[in-house]
Image (cartoon, rainbow, N blue to C red):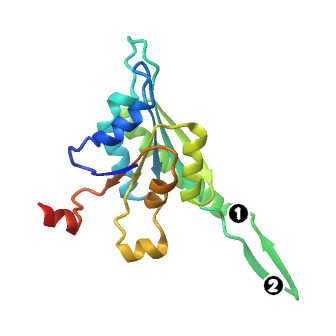
């Protein structure tokens, strides 16, 4: 099940939340995963999640509720192997060069620091997860392994043709994740179809 919401809209994604909530007992909070990359759209999804889902992932300290958890997941694409000839011999390497590794670490640190500031500012218990591989597949594997109740992803706003050729992480996750998926559209994005219906 997938649900689209506008990042600044007041839509509470009731059907997605009801489906996720049915999986949990009344005395438990939800485990929510937000997929992050460096894009503004993924941070719009995080902002939406901590603003609208705070009550279902944050436990009140004075109650007997089991606390919920917000998991922030970021996936480094697998470093592409380079093949280079050297004197008639061909060498292949999958070792990430030191400058690339350091740049990845710095980028990831900045990404998680910014994301943790957002979630902790709303008093949401948060953990981070860093994976390597194809982002689409790794996010779906992480959902299955951690048994989350809801996956929240940002929508890149790709057109139909680009999405068909390039693929879309949100589309893939909506089809393959083993939990409900909430896709947060960028603020102000209204599809032509929705615009005609209004």
> Which disc is residue 85 wearing?
2
In this image, 102 relative to 26: left or right? right
Residue 124 image position (x, y, % from top left): 40, 30
Q: Which residue is mark 1?
A: 96
Q: Nearer the viewer, residue 44 or 103?
A: 44
> Which disc is residue 194 wearing?
none
Quarter of the image where one finds residue 150: top left
Q: Quadrant of the C terminus?
A: bottom left
Q: Nearer the viewer, residue 177 or 84?
A: 177
Residue 190 image position (x, y, % from top left): 22, 62
- Residue 68's place in the image compared with 131, above or below, is above
Query: Which residue is found at the position 24% from the left and 61% from the top?
Result: 189
Residue 61 image position (x, y, % from top left): 40, 15
Q: Nearer the viewer, residue 88 or 138?
A: 138
Query: Which residue is found at the position 34% from the left and 35% from the top?
Result: 18
Q: Nearer the viewer, residue 104 or 50?
A: 50
- Residue 29's place in the image compared with 181, above or below, is above
Query: Is there any visible trace of residue 37 in the rendered image?
Result: no
Contact? badges 2 and 1 (CB < 8 Å): no
Query: Which residue is found at the position 59% from the left and 53% from the top?
Result: 138
* Mark 2 to mark 1 CA distance (whole Å): 18 Å
């Amino acid at each position: 099940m997938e649900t689209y919401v506008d990042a600044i809209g007041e839509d509470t994604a009731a059907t997605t939340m009801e489906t996720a909530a049915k999986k949990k007992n009344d005395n438990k909070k939800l485990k929510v995963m937000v997929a992050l990359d460096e894009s503004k759209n993924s941070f719009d999804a995080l902002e939406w999640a901590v603003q609208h889902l705070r009550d279902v992932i944050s436990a009140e300290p004075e109650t007997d509720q089991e606390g919920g958890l917000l998991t922030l997941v970021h996936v480094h694409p697998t470093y592409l192997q380079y093949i280079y000839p050297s004197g008639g011999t061909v060498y292949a390497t999958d070792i990430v060069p030191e400058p690339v590794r350091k740049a990845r670490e710095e980028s990831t640190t900045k990404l998680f620091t910014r994301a943790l500031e957002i979630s902790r500012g709303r008093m949401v218990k948060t953990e981070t997860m860093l994976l390597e591989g194809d982002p689409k597949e790794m996010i779906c594997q992480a959902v299955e392994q951690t048994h989350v109740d809801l996956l929240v992803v940002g929508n890149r706003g790709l057109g139909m043709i680009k999405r068909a050729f390039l693929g879309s992480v949100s589309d893939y996750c909506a089809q393959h994740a083993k939990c409900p998926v909430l896709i947060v559209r960028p603020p102000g994005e209204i599809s032509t179809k929705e615009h005609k219906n209004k």
